[in-house]
Image (spheres, helix red, strand yellow):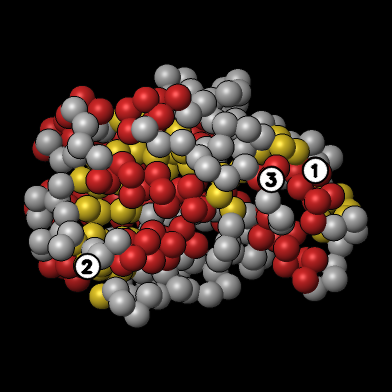
Amino acid sequence: MKKSLVTGAAGFIGSHIVDKLIELGHEVVAIDNESANNDFFYWNPKAKNYKLDICNLQETQHLYEGVDYVFHLAAESRIQPAIENPINAVFLNCVGTTTVLQCSRMANVKKVIYSSTSSGYGMNPAPNVETQPDECLNPYSVSKIAGEKLCKMYTDLFQLNTVIFRYFNVYGDRSPTNGQYAPVIGIFQRQRANKEPLTVVGTGQKLRDFVHVSDIVDANITVALSEVNAMHYGQVYNVGSGENITILEIAKRISDNYIFIPPRIGEVETTLANIEKIKKVFGWSPKISINKIQL
């Protein structure tokens, strides 16, 4: 039986990964401190669940014993809260990631999958490709890209097999809807359910690459279980749909009742993933297009 550990395990993406691992017969250790501003936390009763802080080495180190794969998703994962509290974002995303990597190294974990962000591309022209330079526009992206560098260092210096995923705009079941800074599709769906006008930021012409959470799960599982040459570890891989759509188009598909609100700082105009690298190295490609499903 394979043993996997998931951080951020009760959150949006992490809970889906836990569910899939259990379905595949893995023994799963789930860690989450429930600090995110989520509507709900999704603990799978078939996992070994721990409400702990990943930054606490003393409390969490023993949980990595005998683990084959670590899926590291715990983070301050929203741009605007990170702008409002940069110290918290940097502490959680840098110290937390270092602690996860050190625990994994000491436990001889086979592979660590690190969930990062496409916001590290900043103002680079779309489509974004992994060879583009980093351009971090806010504390969230700075802290997450620092986590990427830590992963690469642990691969280069300590031979810990790490894989770095840059997610684009993830949507799907269990997406957070609380607050004005939740993922946009979740906000729109909450507003529709409450019979409120959808709040479109700026002109609504920002383009986003939306990737379904089931495709994110599939990428994590596929890459964890793949055997590839050591040269492919410690590297960044885009995980997106390879297509984009305006926020206004999304709003119109959800409701004809929408209004415009002022633009926000620290957000790029366009995201679009070039996913050729992950296709070539790991044979992964997305299965769901946002243009072909009901929102």
Local secondary structure at mark 3:
helix
Residue 24's place in the image compared with 269, above or below, is below
Mark 3, Cα crowd under 10 Å, few <14 / some 14-19 / many 20+, is: few
Q: Name the disc covering residue 129, or none.
A: none
Image-based side of 184 in relation to 286, left or right: right
Q: Which residue is mark 2?
A: 27
Q: Which residue is mark 1?
A: 249
Type of amino acid under label 2: Glu
Q: Which tag, 1 or 2, sits closer to the chain's start? A: 2
Residue 139's place in the image compared with 30, above or below, is above
Viewer-closest of 278 and 61: 278
Q: Quadrant of residue 177?
A: bottom right
Percent position (x, y) of residue 12? 49, 62
> Pointers 1 and 2 in contact (CB under 8 A)?
no
Is residue 57 in view from this perspective? Answer: no
Q: CA distance from mark 3 to mark 1?
A: 13 Å
Type of amino acid under label 1: Glu
Q: Residue at x 85, y 58 (%)?
A: 255
Type of amino acid under label 3: Lys
Mark 1, Cα crowd under 10 Å, few <14 / some 14-19 / many 20+, is: few
Q: Which residue is mark 3?
A: 292
> Pointers 3 and 1 in contact (CB under 8 A)?
no
